[in-house]
Image: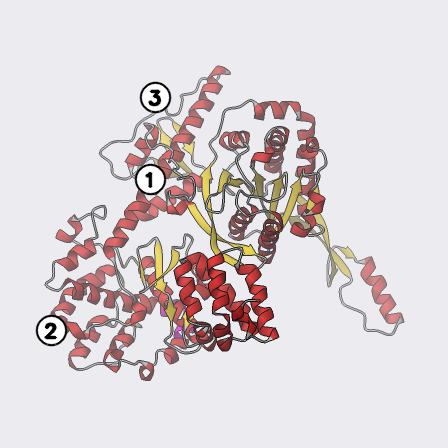
Amino acid sequence: MTAQLIILDDEAKSAVESQIKIVWPISHSLCGNLVAQAAKILRCLSPAQFEDWTRELLACYEKEGLKRANAMIASGGHDHICMAAGERGLELAEIKGLLEYFLAALTRNPPVILAGDVATTDTAEIILPQVINQAGERERNLVLYKLVLLIQWGYLKNSTLFPIIPDTASAQTDNEGSALAALCAGKDNPALALTLYQLLETARVSTLLRELFPGLFHQLEDIIAPERIKDQHAAWLYDLCLGRKTVTSGKYGKVARLVIPPGKSPEDSVARLNDLYQITETMADEIRLPWFAGVLRPNDAARARKMRREKTEKKFINLLACRLAAAANQEGQDEEEGEANTPIGGDSAIMPPENSSKSSSLESDANGNRYLNLGNKKLILDLELSAIAREIESDLGGVPQSYISGAMSGVGGVPQWEDDGGEYRGNKDDVADYDEWDYRRRGFRRDWCRLVKRELRPVCSNLVRNTLENKRGLLIRLRKSFEAMRAQEKWQRRQNDGDEIDLEAVIEARADLAARLQPRDGMYRRNLRDERDTEALFLIDMSSSTEGWVGQIIRESLILLVEAMECLGDTYSIYGFSGMRRLRCDFFHIKHPLEPCSEDVRNRIAAISPMEYTRMGPAIRHASSILAESEARHRVLFIISDGKPEDYDDYKGEYAIQDTRHALIEAKSAGIYPFCVTVDREASSYIARMYGEVNYAIISECAHLPEKIPEIYRSLTS
């Protein structure tokens, strides 16, 4: 026992010793400093609080480094006590997940929520204050967080950052900068002009939000009441920003009359800006918007929008080029078989006119299918390509002809990936950070793993054709079995009316009467057809241990499975995973949920090959996030692996098993049913601890996989 711990009582010593075992493997230096300051910390914290505080310390160390963690130790636990007492307000980190779900319910492709000093947005990200401590109680501060988030979302939804400005301001394109910033720059006081425009827009956005969220604004009537505003001089601006006009006379009354009632569009705000600027030019110091309005950064928004458009353009061109190539190949095969058709994408295709800025070639048929006119041919767009086209149309008003020309001429190459041997440094939209469960500390290592989303490039191979030919008998049986699952008849018992008498219910009622009990209602049963409402995600282990026979059988199993799934009609997706260390957990796209089962998908299955290690936790968490977006009644996460989780670093043994187990528990909590199929003969020693007693199957002979996997899927979803 060190000298620093001798002075502690037995309960405190026990608390410190238990945490030393957790901190020492992570950082010797941090552990030494913790022991040295333990007596001081335990004068502020109880032994029970010490464990929670140590968990916060490790999270701080892993996120901000040793220097910041040592500073936390130096505070002697005072920050923890302040947080528990509510003196430090509500931190964004505590409720970020809640706000992300809230935002996801409002918009289909929500921006990323990040912490900063002041609220703002560049369209790709929404920055919120790290801490809000304006209303005392936690629940009140949470209401304020929702208000700040909604205002930034309202700016995006109502085009606040991108008003249509006539004359000289509109000459500055969004590719070079912001027309709004250019308009304000033309004033003697550009900062005041932008503040006034934001005042007009905040009043407009708040008025719209009040109609959508009346309950939230009712709560705000008390939280942001005039008597609660510390700066009474700015109380009138609080009211205007919330869409309320409380002053009607004097210089402030002139401002209020221009702001309230608000305009209908950002262009209305631009139209009022000159008049508002003239009457406030001499009172610039008094126009300070309330903190919850944040700030507008139009140039940042213009740059982010440009980057998003470039990315969407490249993705559209690449996907359309692939579809055109596939269509041309199909036409070539038809010609070889004696069918004389005009090839798509060849010399006979009509190129879009170069002098047209918007597409006249993308059209919709009576069924709502999008298609591309190419001479005397129609190329129907699949769901993925249609979704991107609609995104472009909502942004630009149409798909530019240059996008279609680029795909037809073969420009727009496949994006390249660059790693530095460790952390991925490519496009930030292609990465996702996930927590990792550390059973030793009974807490998460926050944002510890970096998952990298990759494209598995299709390969031309005889594997698909050979599998379908050699396993023809099995495939026929699987198709018949899956077709029988499409819609099954089920009886709904104990109905007040129905197709026939429910004999069991009648017998039970007679028994109740004989026992002098009140019989239950419902003496009929009704015949229902149970329409399937299932989505499945197949997660494939692509670690180096699958090399050889195992990998071959897994690919054959997937080829047969997708053929059978096409008969069933369930929504399904396929992804692979592998990686090297925590900062490069690779997640490979094979088939997205709404992607049709095309030749590209089959060729991606053929491209599945052994990679590196098996860090399961991040892959399971990301797969769960994909399934969590589904509205299906039954969601199944089907994992196919040949062994236990393991990575090159310390992700092995009990640590890896417990993290995988916790990731599966998180999936279950989200309403997802996880199931694992493994061909590891030694799996019985660990797999029950990861998956539970009924959530896995061990296949002793991998040659049985092609038949077993569809059978297991049928049993899970019937």
Residue 339, image x and y in percent?
48, 17
Q: Nearer the viewer, mark 3 or mark 1?
A: 1
Mark 3 near mark 1, Cβ–Cβ under 8 Å? no
Magenta range: 210-218
Residue 144, image x and y in percent?
38, 71
Residue type at the position of mark 2: Thr
Residue 467, image x and y in percent?
62, 25
For label 3, the SS is: loop
Q: Which residue is mark 1?
A: 313
For label 2, the SS is: helix
Q: In the rendered structure, which disc, 3 or 1, sits on the residue that comes first in sequence?
A: 1
Dot 3: few (<14), some (14–19), or many (≥20) neighbours within 10 Å?
A: few
Residue 165 belongs to the span the image colors magenta: no
Disc number placed over residue 348 in the picture, else none: 3
Q: Which residue is mark 2?
A: 282
Q: Nearer the viewer, mark 3 or mark 2?
A: 2
Q: In the rendered structure, which disc, 3 or 2, sits on the residue that comes first in sequence?
A: 2
Residue type at the position of mark 3: Ser
Q: In the rendered structure, which disc, 2 or 1, sits on the residue that comes first in sequence?
A: 2
Q: Is residue 379 visible?
A: yes
